[in-house]
Image: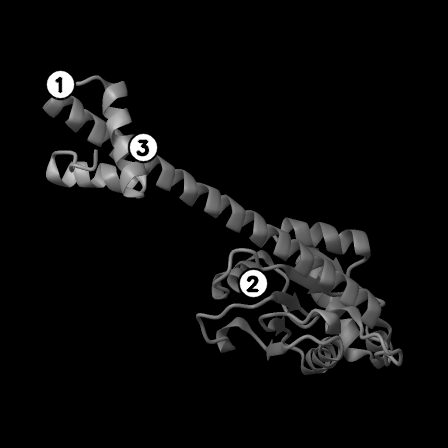
Amino acid sequence: MSRYSHQSESTSALLEDPVSLEHLAPPVRVVTSARPAPMQQQRARKPLLLLDAAAQSRDFLSTLLSDLGMPIKSHENLSSIETPVTFELAVLGPGSSHDKAVIAGVRRVDSSVCLPILLIGGYSADEGMNWALSSSADDYLGAPLSSEFLGARIHSLLAARHRSELALTSASDRTAHLERALDTNRCIGIALGILMATEKITADLAFQRLKAASQKSNRKLRDIADDVIYTGALAEHV
């Protein structure tokens, strides 16, 4: 029997047996303190995708996640999702398929590159995590499921996503800065070559002339170099 077959049987048992479903999803504890719950303090910027073909578990998880302060987009299957769309996080409930094709499909409908995917089902913790990681999901939760534990795991996944996005942004900024620097150096090099050829001077002297023109006109060296490339000569700034 395959892992997926085992998951399907476990899921069916959870959905058909009210006692099992109560074990998977106990009632949400009401927060009575003045301090809001963690997910209420930092709401997701984009909605969370809940994918579950079973109405019973989908409705329960929708309520649980909403009580945690999460905006929800609930769907039975991928075909009902209108694209393009961006989600903060995806939760695949016990009534959804957890196979690799579905997880890959979830990533395709989302336009971001850092979408965390949380599986919820009937495996044990070790089996579920092994299945999640082998299927390219990010985390797994099984029975019993509490609102506090679910909120903590979602918060952890969102924090990891935020770190990934910062790293990608930082890398992109560094790449853009490097490209601008290389382009500037190329332009200055071309301008130096033009001055060396037209004025019969050395590279050092050509650079000093560019630098002096930049300082006297209070313009960037790159802008002076662009002028030289465009006109073929250094304007009479000095």
Residue 217 vertical position relative to residue 53 in the rendered view, above or below = above
Which residue is denoted by mark 2 in the rendering?
A: 102
58 or 170, nearer to the observer: 170
Q: Residues within 10 Å of mark 2 (few under 14, many from 20)?
A: some
Left or right position of 230 against 133: left
Callout in the foreground (3, 2): 3
Q: How far separated are the C-alphas under marks 3 and 1?
A: 21 Å
Contact between marks 3 and 2 (CB within 8 A): the answer is no
Q: Is residue 2 visible?
A: no
Name the image quarter holding the C terminus: top left
Q: How far separated are the C-alphas under marks 3 and 2?
A: 48 Å
The percent position of residue 120, horizontal first and vertical second, equals 72, 65
The residue at 49%/74% (across/down) is 79
Residue 177 vertical position relative to residue 4 in the rendered view, above or below = above
SS state under label 2: helix
Callout in the foreground (2, 1): 1
